[in-house]
Amino acid sequence: MAVLQALEDLIAGQYEPPISSAEALARLGVPAASIATLAHDEISTTTISTSAVDADTLFQACSISKPIAAVAVFRAAQAGHLSVTAPITEYLSPQQLAFLETTQTKPLLQHITVEMLLSHTSGLSVGGFPGYAHDPPPIATILQGRSPSNTCQVRLEGFPGQRVEYSGGGITVAQMILETVLRKPFAAIVQELVFEPLRMSRSCYKLPDTERNFAGAYDTADTAHEPPYHIFPELAAAGLWTTPRELLVVIRALQSSLQGANDSFLRQAWARLMLTAVQSKFARGWMAPAGSNVIYHGGSNHPGYRCMLLGWVDVAGEGTAELGKADGCGICVMTNSPQGQQMVIKIAQAAGYLMGWPPIPTALGVDADIVPLVALGEVSDEWKAWAGRWGDKWHILPDERPMLKFASLPPVRLLPAAVTPRRDQDGRPSIDLVAEGLQVMLRLRWENGERVVEVRPGQDSEADVLARTPV
């Protein structure tokens, strides 16, 4: 809990003079954030909100529904109900397969396997779903893209196994397979295979009519959205309601499974198969780039839910020395406004910085354009070696405190960034700074034996790497 209190203090310190963490987060566009950290089997929680939100408040898990669905598939496979390497034609009827068919692609459907659905390599279309304000159609209608579905038919657009193409449609086909094989509704299947064994009492796929402790979606920190949430019949892809604590219960169970514990939730071989990269950064249901020691998934549901889940793991069984203080750790952040898109990563970066974790692996691609929060404290004097002109318009002024000047504009103070430094091949850490009051980050680092300045402007822009300008 000390780290979470330090995190709240850090968020409150984004403004001068400091304000409450809830007010600071609201100024940044997020009315509520529910946060949980996992450190060596212990899960700690906190909430930062301008409304009545607590650790048991339900949020939509958005696309984090997908890895939870994958866990259910692998639990079913472990029990012998299906094979993840089998073609989908083995489990779906001709009528169900017809939902996905076109005249030209019908012969290729038999080459799609269950694990291709989970790894987004099936070639099936429809990346995501917007949900429904009311009266959602059944899955059969959605897969066919027939009225009143608000998405097109889920159909083959690439060769099975050809490449990664993110497909919520493919995950929805996996949902249909589970329901067909086990002859139960998907929600009941996950309840039996995942929620009950892990004692996840605050996780569900349909809000009970009596449930009042849920976070409604906001457009901004001050403007509530009506209706307060959308309904997602595509349960496996986007329909989960849960809490950060319960998602970290899953991470903890998978960490234990990978260690080969006798009472593991998944047997070690099954856990390794699920979490081993297939192509790019995708494993089966999870993002898990090869050699990265993390499993991850983010999420974004219309109209306002944004979230992320990350766990540090040893998938290959090569030892945990590289994980350092992150061994057995994880974090989950859930928010209820579109501005949470970047904030969930900023909060995760800051928590990792405070806990001494390694940086979020670049292979995930989730923080490439994120400007971190400002850390409390002062910048070490090592920045002074980077004083001078960089590129055509940037100037780090040689003052007592680092100042940044762009072109002919007035200088702006540089403050320490709340993000774990990245080390070069010689082990030298970066110096990460944020321009006061702006979404601009400077990373002072080495490249090919020379000092360089990396300018990260945020707003989905690529970083510029600047060489020193000769005097």
Image (cartoon, rainbow, N blue to C red):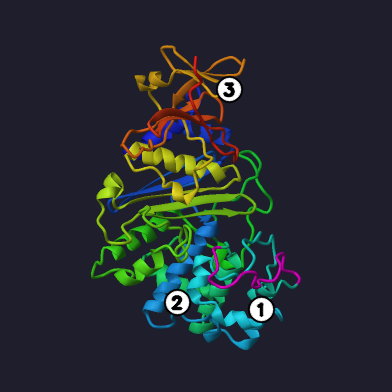
Q: Earlier in the sequence, mark 2 or mark 3?
A: 2
| Amino acid at circle 3 | Asp
Tag 2 secondary structure = loop
Residue at screen point 30% across, 53% down? 328
Observer-nearest of 339 and 410: 410
Find disc 3 in the rendering and name its residue: 392
How far is disc 1 from disc 2 in space, using C-alphas?
22 Å
Q: Name the residue under label 2.
A: 84
For this rendering, which residue is in front, 222 or 100? 100
Tag in front: 1 or 2: 1
Q: Residue drawn 59% across and 14% down?
A: 410
| Camera sees residue 100 | yes
Q: Does the CB distance between marks 1 and 3 fall below 8 Å?
A: no
**Residue 191 seen:** no
Q: Give the range drawn in magenta.
A: 147-164
The vertical placement of 298 against 103, above or below, is above
| Amino acid type at mark 1 | Thr
Task: Give the x, y percent position of residue 455.
Answer: 52, 31
Structural crowding at the residue carrying mark 3, measured as other residues with C-alpha within 10 Å and reported as few (<14), some (14–19) or many (≥20)? few
Q: Can residue 154 be found in the magenta stretch?
A: yes
Mark 1–mark 3 Cα distance, whole angstroms, equals 54 Å
Mark 2 vs mark 3: in front? 3
Who comes first in sequence, dot 1 or dot 3? 1
Q: In this view, does 29 lie to the left or right of 39?
A: right
- Residue 377 falls in which quadrant of the image? top left
Quarter occupied by the N terminus: top left
